[in-house]
Image (tube, grey):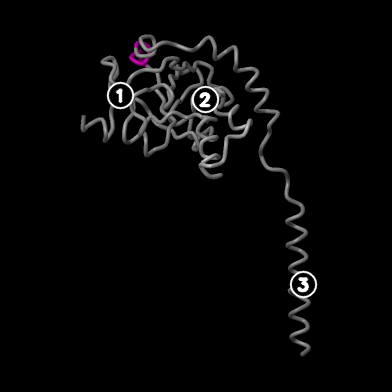
Amino acid sequence: MKARTCALAAALVIASVVSAEEGTYPRAKVSYDDFKSLVAEVEAHRQERLVDLDTFLRMSREPGVVLLDTRSTFRYERIHLAGAKHLSFPDFTQDNLRAVIPSPETTVLIYCNNNFDGNEVDFATKAFRPSDSAALELRAAGTETPPTPGSQIRAQAKPLMLALNIPTFITLFGYGYRNVYELDELVRVTDPRLSFEGTVAAKK
């Protein structure tokens, strides 16, 4: 009985210590203020570095330029612009970036799904479409249910673009890369100026 009492007391002490330790965790390494400051600083800088396809392709052929694809590894391996290096956006760290882009002075070219039209499988448009959301809402409510005023407004609202280029540009800037240029056109994947590599591209 005495041994059981001691064991119970020890367990309670351990539980209280663990509980106390959990209560002393520091804040997460997340700063919305840092991100807001970066966005404000990047806006004008990025505006001067949006380029058309001809300029983008010409720059990609210059010595030392890095053409960077930050989509998922799966999508990159299926299809990407010829010569593009890959680092998936979730894998961005100072060390990982340095392995792909050795110098902050390197000219970096970026693109994402929202730059290409005609392949909604591998270059699916990143966007929130209020009309799609409203339709799903009405379908869930039943076809006999008339649309609410709110759903009608959402159905007419402009899609919200959520392109990967934006966080990629901002994050590269935050890591010290200032010579980043972004493709600013929506290009058909069948455009003869384009050259693709990857498992899907090889079959075409």
Quadrant of the image containing the C terminus? top left
Q: Which residue is mark 2?
A: 161
Q: Amino acid at mark 3?
A: Leu
Q: Amino acid at mark 2?
A: Met
Q: CA distance from mark 1 to mark 3?
A: 62 Å
Label 1's element? loop
Residue 69 locus on image (x, y percent): 41, 28
Q: CA distance from mark 3 to mark 2?
A: 53 Å
- The segment highlighted magenta reads 58-63
> Comparing marks 3 and 2, which lies closer to the viewer?
2
Q: Amino acid at mark 1?
A: Ala
Label 3's element? helix
Task: Residue at 50% x, 15% y: name it.
Answer: 179
Where residue 23 sits, quadrant-wise, is bottom right
Residue 84 locus on image (x, y percent): 35, 25
**In the picture shown, does residue 85 fall above or below 141?**
above
Mark sitting on residue 157:
none
Lower position in the chain sequence, tag 1 or tag 3: 3
Name the foreground residue: 190 vs 200. Answer: 190
Task: Residue at 78% x, 88% y: name it.
Answer: 2
> Comparing marks 1 and 2, which lies closer to the viewer?
2
At label 1, counting other C-alpha atoms closer than 10 Å, the crowd grade (few under 14, some 14-19, many 20 or more) is some
Q: Which residue is mark 3?
A: 12
Asked whether 62 falls inside the magenta stretch, the response is yes
